[in-house]
Image (spheres, rainbow, N blue to C red):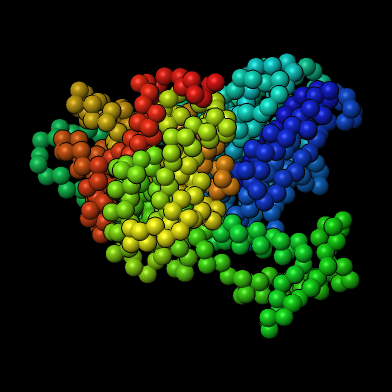
Amino acid sequence: MCGIFACFCDHSLITKINNNESIRHFLCRRGPDQFAKLQIPVGGADYHSGLQLCLMSSVLQLRGGREPCDQPLMDSVGNVLQWNGQVFAGSMTVDDSESDTEAMMRELANCLTDAEMLAKLSRICGPWSFTYWDSNRRRFWFGRDLLGRRSLCWNTDARDQVLIISSISYFESEPAREWSEIPANGVYCLDLSADRPLKDTIADIRHYPWNRQISGTEIISSANDVSLTLKSPITVPLNRLSQPIDSDDQQIPEQVIKGFIEVLRQSLRRRCHNQQTLCKKCFARTMDDTENGLTTDDDGGELVAEFSSDSEGDILGTSPIQQDMLINKMLNSRQRNKECTHASTAILFSGGLDSTIIALLADECVPPALPIDLLNVAFDNDAPDRETGLKAWDELKALRPNRRWNFVSIYVSKEELQTMRDKHIKYLVKPSQTVLDDSIGCAIWFAANGRGLLMEEHMVTKVYETPARVVLLGMGADEQLAGYTRHRRVFDKQGLSGLIDEIALELDRLSSRNLGRDDRVASDHGREPRYPFLDEDVINFLNGIPVWHKCDLRLDRSTGEKLLLRQVADRLGLCRTSHHLKRAIQFGSRIAKIEEFREKGEDVCTRLTS
């Protein structure tokens, strides 16, 4: 995971940008393992005149070797990549030992045309946002994946002076004050081959759209050349078959249940496996050992190697072959003597249907010696999510007794909520600004923070903070499986055809609603959020089945919504959890009641804008 900041401005603003500590502060909270800056003259002959490109990146190293992959990553000819993503699947594959940032740089650097760039990006399945400076063609590319699972924002004012593209949208004392999320409707390209004013370059920005929406609906592009579109990883159109519900037989075919379990299982495997299964502390210790050149040998003695700070990590006094042998010996002995036995994976855990199924399937993917942390947030100790969380925890322990399930009880007082919102959280939620954004954004921030009380048999044992570097979230299930109250309202008025239209609408606006906000608040703790229900294969599977295999809204609330997922829970042995009512996080955690404001969810929240 990466924190991205890219700024086009005149050289006169560069010092102000470079000295802005709030940029580094927010980026490094997302990526605590590495931070670097890079300046590229794009409109003048040197660093002291003309248009400049200022890049800053931070890194949370999850894949490849233990050494962070440098970002911004520059190759030998001057191409520069900022990559905040994961290549989980698709026709592009990344070896387990390699950083996907390096793999992406290699792929993009070989592109000679716009069509080739789009073809490369179309090969990826997984969440991403990026910027890429094509040094030879003097073009600057940026964008987000189809679902918008990674945040990327830009300023909408002061564009005659500055264009900022960033993972977050708040910096102190910047000329830009108004922000929006960059639409996840394709990728964008700035042509900087001609020396002209910045506002003119922005006015001529090129947009290359996706060829399909998330519902699978084909998008008619204004471009005559179909090669100048991104090929969507969602290839299955939403099944729009409707039939009169005139039978009491609500059985979903067994092959549908088994098929859904399998695509979910594969989704969890990708999201649990593509990391180093090291907790924060053990990863930091490994990095410290690498920097210091210290580890233990096979017999437990100390092995010392001296690293040069100015020779790109060469080990002094050794030949290249000896260097490789020594490094391999150091890494192998470190793995034997410093195995991490702490939680590297956590789950935002309400005890509801979505999060409990994620937990049970994650048990199949996380190494058995490692705990899994269940992060349960409440703003009232009698909150519904606390009760369902404890019950679901008991069910998980009964079904998987060999796993260490760490139930982390996170209680947030009204005073703590107000203090942290005003001090920090509101800057992450921006540019989102509704009452609903406030409630959900704050709840996710405190949950992903992972600091609370560790429970044992429903009793507090100690204060605990999860050391996990990956956190799993259940977003996406309600939109696809008719889990919201509004789905029932539409069904009651318009029947199945209206419900199908509502699900299509929910799918197609996923990227523009909440996921950018959720990424900003969850990533702020140096943990990468991953969404199993928003895997491309999961969406394709659910798009392909008829709506009556997903839900039956004639039935009661604890049965009809997300009926397929309830059937999955039953098959997996989660008999009690399969009947839990759906509660949105703002109600289940009681954050919506703690301050007793009488507001509508879509109202602008003054607590975020003040």
Residue 305 lies, in percent from the top left, at: 80, 70
Residue 544 versus residue 463 in the image, above or below:
above
Q: Horizontal placement of 607 versus 203: left or right?
A: left
Along the line of sight, which residue is nearer the eye, 571 or 455? 455
Relative horizontal placement of residue 38, taking residue 145 as reference (left or right): right
- The reply, left or right, for residue 549 in relation to residue 401 is left
Residue at 37 percent across and 21 percent down: it is: 599
* Residue at 51% from the left image edge and 46% from the top image edge: 449
Q: Position of residue 361 (x, y in %)?
A: 37, 57
Counting every numbered tag in the picture gives: 0
Q: Residue 277: which quarter of the image? A: bottom right
Q: Nearer the viewer, residue 241 or 65?
A: 65
Residue 96, given in percent of the width and then of the height, sits at: 59, 60
Quick check: can you spot residue 474? yes
Up the image or down, 102 lies above or below 424; here it is: below
Q: Residue furthest bottom?
A: 299
Residue that extends furthest to the front in the rendered view of this protein: 415
For image coordinates 39% across by 28% down, the residue present is: 595
